[in-house]
Image (cartoon, rainbow, N blue to C red):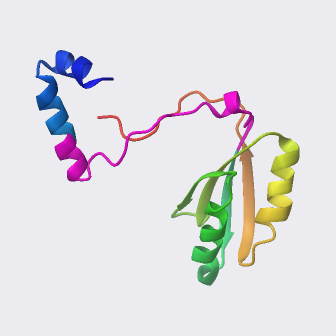
C-alpha cells in the first residue's frame, strides 16, 4: 500500500504517515518490507517440514550448515521433543529425497529426523498482524 493510500485510510497526511513509518523502522518495530513469492509458481512444488534432533554440542553447527542450503526456507530452534524445526521447499520428490539423503543425513550430530509433507495450505501469514 502506498503512503498516499495509507494516509487516506488513516486520515493523515502522506508526510505524517512516512514519518511514523520511519520512526517504527528506527525503533526496530518494522524490520523490513518484503515481497511474498508463491513458491509453486516458481517451480518449488514440494513443501516439507522437518523435526530434527541433534546432540547438544552439535546444534549450532548443524543449524548453521542447514541454513546455508538454498532449499531451507526457515529453520528454528524449538522447545519440546525436537530441537530444530525446518521448512524446506524443493522442485519435486526426487530433489527432496536427494536433500534428505545427501544434505540432511550427511550432517554429524543429528540423532533423529521426522518429516511432514505439506498436502494443502489453508492459511499462511508472514510477519505479525496488528
Q: Residue furthest bottom?
A: 57
Report the residue at 74% width, 52% height from top: 115
**Between 128 and 22, the one nearer to me in the picture:** 22
Number of marks in picture:
0
Above or below residue 100? Residue 37 is above
Above or below residue 130? Residue 68 is below
Quadrant position of the C terminus in the picture: top left
Is residue 24 covered in magenta? yes
Above or below residue 78? Residue 35 is above
Q: Residue furthest front?
A: 15
Report the residue at 67% width, 53% height from top: 70
Looking at the rendering, the stretch of residues picked out in magenta corresponds to: 22-47
Report which quarter residue 42 is drawn in.
top right
Report the residue at 85% width, 43% height from top: 93
* Lateral position of residue 98 relative to residue 29, left or right: right
Expressed as whole percent of the image width and height from the top left, the position of residue 113 reads 74, 62
Q: Residue furthest right?
A: 94
Report the residue at 66% width, 69% height from top: 65
Is residue 29 covered in magenta? yes
Expressed as whole percent of the image width and height from the top left, the position of residue 29 reads 26, 48
Expressed as whole percent of the image width and height from the top left, the position of residue 28 reads 26, 53
Quadrant position of the N terminus in the picture: top left
* Lateral position of residue 66 relative to residue 106, left or right: left
**Between 17 and 44, the one nearer to me in the picture:** 17
Amino acid at each position: 500500500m502506498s503512503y498516499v493510500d495509507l494516509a487516506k485510510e488513516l486520515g493523515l497526511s502522506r508526510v505524517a504517515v512516512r514519518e511514523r513509518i520511519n520512526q517504527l523502522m528506527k525503533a526496530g518495530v518494522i524490520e523490513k518490507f518484503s515481497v511474498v513469492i508463491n513458491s509453486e509458481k516458481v517451480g518449488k512444488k514440494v513443501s516439507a517440514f522437518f523435526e530434527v534432533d541433534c546432540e547438544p554440542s552439535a546444534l549450532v553447527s548443524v543449524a548453521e550448515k542447514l541454513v546455508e542450503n538454498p532449499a531451507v526456507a526457515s529453520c528454528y530452534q524449538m522447545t519440546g521433543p525436537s530441537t530444530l524445526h525446518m521448512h524446506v521447499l524443493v522442485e519435486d520428490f526426487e530433489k527432496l529425497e536427494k536433500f534428505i539423503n545427501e544434505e540432511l543425513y550427511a550432517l554429524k550430530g543429528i540423532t533423529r529426523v521426522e518429516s511432514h509433507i505439506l498436502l494443502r495450505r489453508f492459511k499462511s501469514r508472514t510477519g505479525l498482524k496488528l
